[in-house]
Image (tube, rainbow, N blue to C red):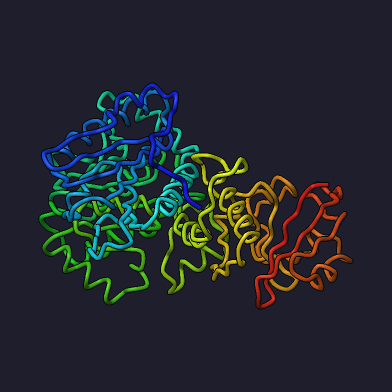
Amino acid sequence: MSFSHENPTNHTNPLQLLLPPKISGKRGEVFIKFHSPEIIIVDCEGELTDCVIDKLNSYLNDYHYQSLVRNYGHNTFIILDISLLAPVNPKLLEKISFLLVIIKSPKSKAKIRVTKTYVQITHSFDEALLYVLTFKQQRQFVSKNDYYTNFIQRWLKEPGRNYISNYRVLSDPSWQIFGENLKMYATIDVIEGNILKLSLSGFIDNFAIERLVHLIKKVLHDIGINQNHHSIVLIIDSKNVVGFSLRIYNFMWAMIKREINTACVYLVASGIVKTYHYLFKYSQNEVYRNWELITDIDAAIDKSIVNQLSIDKDLLGESETNSFNQEKKKQPLFLEMYESLKPLTMSGDEPPTLELIQNPSTLGDYIKNLVINLWLNNKLVEPVEFEMPPVSLSLLNTLNQAVLFCQDSRIVSANRYSETVWGYDPFLLHNQPLAVLVELSSVSDIIKMLSNQTIDNLITYHYYGYSLPMTCTKIEAGNGMYFLSFVNK
């Protein structure tokens, strides 16, 4: 399947007039096209210079700001196509604002390595668009939280409307500690809702640490983050700390770990702080498992944005949360979706049909196109075999039908839509017998079902006690595991 980006998409959004169709340099040109109001394609030809990038960023920043005035939930995503670009320093490409994906010619032997954690290198527009839409889906999940709405409303009232690394940052005069009798100065900024950047300077003692923990709690209260449901990312900038003892260092991190629900902690440090961190990390690796020493603030923000959805307890089933606490490396949920769907973009290249959605701007529309395209190709050519990884809970949460993932006769996890059908929080269904939802006499029938078989009028039970006849389809996943999808009669 291929979505063409040879011609600019014609949208009615008048703000697109803020961006010129072309920016010219001495030896190269940049062409700007819109896939949607949020997804912008930048094609480069010839040579790319700092002057051209500065002009491009000026236009992009103005467009992004004006879009936010109209819609506070707006995000800008850049797909950069360098297939026709002369060899260039990757650091120059990373200067482009809102860059998310770089399309590189599959014939090119040049190696491009980017430092930004979330910037992806692809070889086709289909892959690039899929990556953007999965990342966009993550941003939409985060923006649905009450604390994020509160954050945006406060940010819009700020006269400066500040940014760090193209992300919204909120400051408040009450979010700082200073005074004549204090040896430490501290200030907190909030980035994109649930990322706290703590800047420290001076000398740290016991009294300062207690004040610091109270300040963090105040910021969480002001933003509206309930730590029983949501974790945060904490970035600690300690480059300007001039003194503290080894005992104080250990006490500070112990207080933060005990009092604040932090899923990820990024420490920007120099000098003796680095030495203490390595010492404690080596001797108490389990305690500091989610802590990482990082080079600078921008790199810490990049990693925080990528993991922003992964730390949200409301969006994780118990089984996925447990896997993060084991030796398995934490995987951002949008990357799970991207890796699961990417093989489908290689299923062939059919011309567009009336059934396909032109220029899909949501992940749901894109998935529909992938499925239709795969079906068409399998009818016209030999069926395509894929080694697909297990479907993640994050992907199942995008479906508008109830789905259970089971092993033998127990429920391993349930997607979000299950709650609208049966009234149970998906978290409560973890490790429950299938009989809590399905008529006991039908459980054995489900276990005996073959993959892709369907049972009509299967009796299930709602939280309030009444029965619900449903159509149930089983899909085998191997090793006694299977998916059950339910549709209302």
Quadrant hosting residue 452:
bottom right
Most foreground residue, 321 or 220: 321
Q: How many labels does the image show?
A: 0
Which quadrant of the view contains residue 435?
A: bottom right
Q: Left or right of 74: which side holds 363?
A: right
Say whether residue 210 is visible: no
Using the image as rendered, state which of residue 380 and residue 218 is in the foreground. 380
Question: Which residue sits at x=35%, y=68%?
Answer: 289
- The x, y position of residue 470, in whole percent, is 82, 52
Horizontal and vertical percent for residue 270? 13, 60
Q: Can residue 47 be seen in this view?
A: yes
Pick the residue in front: 204 or 430.
430
In this view, 180 is above or below 101: above
In the image, taking residue 388 as reference, residue 12 lies left or right, namely left
Residue that appears at 43% across and 29% down: 10
As drawn, 488 above or below 455 = above
Q: In this view, does 62 lie above or below 326?
A: above
Image coords of residue 486 (percent x, y)? 75, 54
Residue 163, horizontal then vertical, whole percent: 26, 36
Q: Where on the picture, by quarter, is residue 39?
A: top left
**Most distant residue in the top direction:** 14
